[in-house]
């Protein structure tokens, strides 16, 4: 697992020495483990001799119930939302104190994003992350707000008290307009996705638009919330709850 975890979006391929260095394994052990993973199909070797994640590992990961069921339910609603807005539509879940993007629909005319499916960000860094943080257990909120908050732009909220007040408003209003918090060029509108109409928050759904469209972003709240409601109802139906 340590060998697999040494790969990432910023390290899609590595040679054996790099794998050994990043995992702390002896080169002989790294060689053996890499060989076993390659034989199973979790790693593949490129023409230049470096190793990268194999297709079989992706095939296994793609059937993860937490992501697959959510994506299957959400995708039609995300597609409808995209057809109505032609903006970036994103879906994310919380894992610990981080947000993980699990699905995205983006058009060639949409604003460029810093995020991709599979990317992780601190919960406080994005609008969708803050929606998830607002509905996270108290210990998760305390852990996030108890650490120094990174300023990605000059607009990023980094004061814990200000952010805690924002989380209260998110729980009250059921959405957030995140103005240039992660990037100077983007504004996001985000809302929670539940399991059932009143069940626990399972994910966050968001629309990302250019920062020049901050006023228009607020008009996207209603279609976004309708889509999230539809996803929530269907997730609840599948889970057998209202």
Image: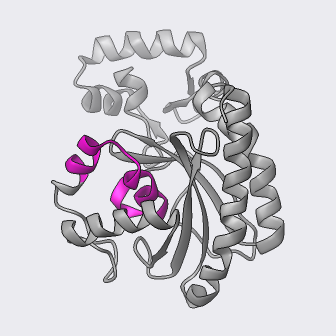
Would residue 44 be found to the left or right of residue 26 on screen?
Answer: right
Q: Is residue 121 visible?
A: no
Please give left or right for residue 136 compared with residue 202 in the image: left
Q: Position of residue 122 (x, y in %)?
A: 35, 53
> Where 239 sits versus 165, above or below?
above
Q: Locate the N terminus by quadrant.
A: top left
Residue drawn at point x = 58 percent, y = 10 percent: 40
Vertical placement of residue 70 versus 23, above or below: below
- Magenta stretch containing residue 127, yes or no? yes
Query: Looking at the rendering, which quadrant does residue 163 occupy?
Result: bottom left
The residue sitting at 74% across, 77% down in the picture is: 109
Tell me if residue 62 comes above or below residue 144 in the rendering: above
Horizontally, residue 200 falls left or right of residue 84, namely left
Q: Nearer the viewer, residue 45 or 224?
A: 224
Q: Residue 105 placed where, x, y %?
A: 71, 58
Q: Residue at x 33, y 72 (%)?
A: 152
Q: Nearer the viewer, residue 14 or 180?
A: 180
Q: Total number of numbered labels?
A: 0
Q: Quadrant of residue 22?
A: top left
Is 133 part of what is drawn in magenta? yes
Main SS of the magenta segment? helix
55 and 149: which is toward the camera: 149
Q: Considering depth in this image, is 167 or 88 the residue closer to the camera?
A: 167
Residue at the image point whose x is 72% and y is 61% from the top: 226
Query: In this picture, which residue range is highlighted in magenta?
Result: 123-144
């Amino acid at each position: 697992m340590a060998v697999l975890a040494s790969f990432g979006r910023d390290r899609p391929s590595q040679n054996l020495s790099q794998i050994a260095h990043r995992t702390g394994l002896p080169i002989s052990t790294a060689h053996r483990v890499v060989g076993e993973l390659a034989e199973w199909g979790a790693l593949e070797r490129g023409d230049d001799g470096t190793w990268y994640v194999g297709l079989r590992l992706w095939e296994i990961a793609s059937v993860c119930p937490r992501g697959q069921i959510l994506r299957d339910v959400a995708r039609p609603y995300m597609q409808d939302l995209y057809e109505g807005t032609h903006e970036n539509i994103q879906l994310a879940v919380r894992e610990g104190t981080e947000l993980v993007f699990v699905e995205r629909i983006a058009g060639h005319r949409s604003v460029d994003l810093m995020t991709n499916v599979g990317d992780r960000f601190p919960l406080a860094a994005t609008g969708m992350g803050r929606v998830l943080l607002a509905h996270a257990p108290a210990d998760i909120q305390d852990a996030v707000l108890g650490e120094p908050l990174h300023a990605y732009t000059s607009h990023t909220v980094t004061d814990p008290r200000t952010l805690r007040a924002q989380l209260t408003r998110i729980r009250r209003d059921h959405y957030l307009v995140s103005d240039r918090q992660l990037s100077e060029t983007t504004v996001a509108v985000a809302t929670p996705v539940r399991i059932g109409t009143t069940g626990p928050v399972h994910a966050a759904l968001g629309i990302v638009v250019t920062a020049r469209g901050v006023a228009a972003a607020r008009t996207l709240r209603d279609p976004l919330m309708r889509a999230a409601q539809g996803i929530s109802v269907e997730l609840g139906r599948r889970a057998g709850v209202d």
